[in-house]
Amino acid sequence: MRRDDICIHVGPVNRARLGAIITDRNSSSKAVWRAEIVLATADGLGTNAIMKRTGKSKPCVWRWQERYVEEGVDGLLRDKTRPPGKKPLSAAVRRKVLAKTASEMPPDATHWSVRSMATAMGISHTSVQRIWAEAGLKPHLVRRFKISNDPQFEEKVTDVVGLYMNPPDKALVLCVVPEARFQHDEKSQIQALDRTQPGLPMKKGRAGTMTHDYKRHGTTTLFAALDVKSGLVIGECQPRHRAKEFIRFLKRIDRAVLRHLDVHLVLDNYGTHKTSEVKAWLVKHTRFKLHFTPTSASWLNLVERFFAEITTKRIRRGTFTSVTELKDAIHDYLDRHNADPKPFVWSKTADTILAKERRALDALEAIKVGNQTSDSQH
């Protein structure tokens, strides 16, 4: 590609304008180097010298020399619009993509990917990405849920949330869970897990490593009671979680709480809490009042928030060669937590929770009715 160097004459007025563009701090960088190309050309510099001065390619230098010849200084200050390489997708195509995403499944998968949808619709995968992003659709994600079928759901939610947001006078509200549901394999005991191979430490450009398999060295059960007001936790590890162990933990709470205070315990519906032995103990200790969360609604128990923290910070990535080592780690975490406790503040009212529950039930009922209608039509 060759061309004889172009000759440009720049009059005094245009030279002043070009100089002002170069010296003005508010000028865009591209306007500055375009003006420099024109002035350098007018001063007799050749293409190679201009390229060296401005750092631009030969075609770029030629293009802006020609633009100045055709349009003057104003031509240097604007970019010519280019027609799009492809015609934008029509609204009809967008609607078809959205409808297909919401109402159909690919033949070989449970959900659409951008590439499978692109193939089905005969468009690019980037177009699918833009359509989904604009509509806020994320077919690769799914949110898990569980709606309680407890017939006393409303009554229990109102009772428990009332304790959190308006606790009774001369009383202590404790959230109690006599088992650990937060463990690695989601059983009722915390397992002392040791990795089969040592992991590599974290370093620049690489995360720390940990084997997916492990050795079991026994289990323990953490009984914990969270003081809603202060954030303090009464906790102890026991080998099992029967009524006998639960009563032993209730006695621990009884010794720890001042005698003039009533004790309101928020509990789940685990069978251990309702045995005849527990009921007999409660008859003799009348300051203890039990409040049960609805079935399938353990999230209503604030102590679950504490379990989430100890899981993340101390258990999940821990390596324990014995139950003793595991218990030591748990008790150490409890001691550190209680040295600087911070309460978990409940913010949602009972009315808000119940309204959300009703919306979920209505949505499920609408889906059920729709499915029945579809079946009858077929």
Image (cartoon, rainbow, N blue to C red):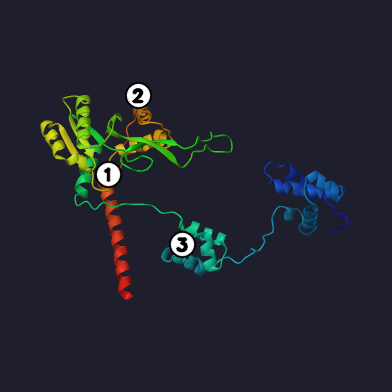
Classed neighbour count for the residue bearing mark 3: other residues with Cα under 10 Å, few (<14), some (14–19), many (≥20): few
Q: Which residue is mark 2?
A: 339
Q: In this orientation, does residue 162 appear? A: yes
Q: Is residue 94 left or right of residue 173?
A: right
| Residue situated in front as seen by the camera: 233 or 271 | 271
Circle 3 is placed at which residue position? 109
Horizontal and vertical percent position of residue 57 = 78, 51
Relative vertical location of residue 121 with respect to residue 2 in this rendering, above or below: below
Amino acid residing under circle 3: Ala
**Mark 3–mark 2 CB contact (< 8 Å):** no
Camera-side mark, 1 or 2: 2
Q: Which mark is residue 349?
A: 1
Q: Using the numbered discs, state the Cα–Cα distance from disc 3 to disc 2 in whole angstroms.
A: 51 Å
Question: Mark 1 Cα within 10 Å, few/some/many (few <14, many 20+)?
Answer: some
Front of the two marks 3 and 1: 3
For the point 34% across and 25% down, the residue is 335
Name the residue: 51% across, 38% down: 209
Secondary-structure class at tag 2: helix
At label 1, the amino acid type is: Thr
- Which numbered disc, 3 or 2, marks the residue closer to the eye? 3
Residue 190: x and y in percent read 34, 37
Q: Secondary structure at mark 1?
A: loop
Say which label, 3 or 1, has the lower sequence index: 3
Q: Residue at x 39, y 52 (%)?
A: 143
Q: Do the numbered discs 1 and 2 sit on residues whose CB atoms are within 8 Å?
A: no
The answer to whether residue 168 is left or right of residue 214 is: left
Residue 59: x, y in percent? 79, 55
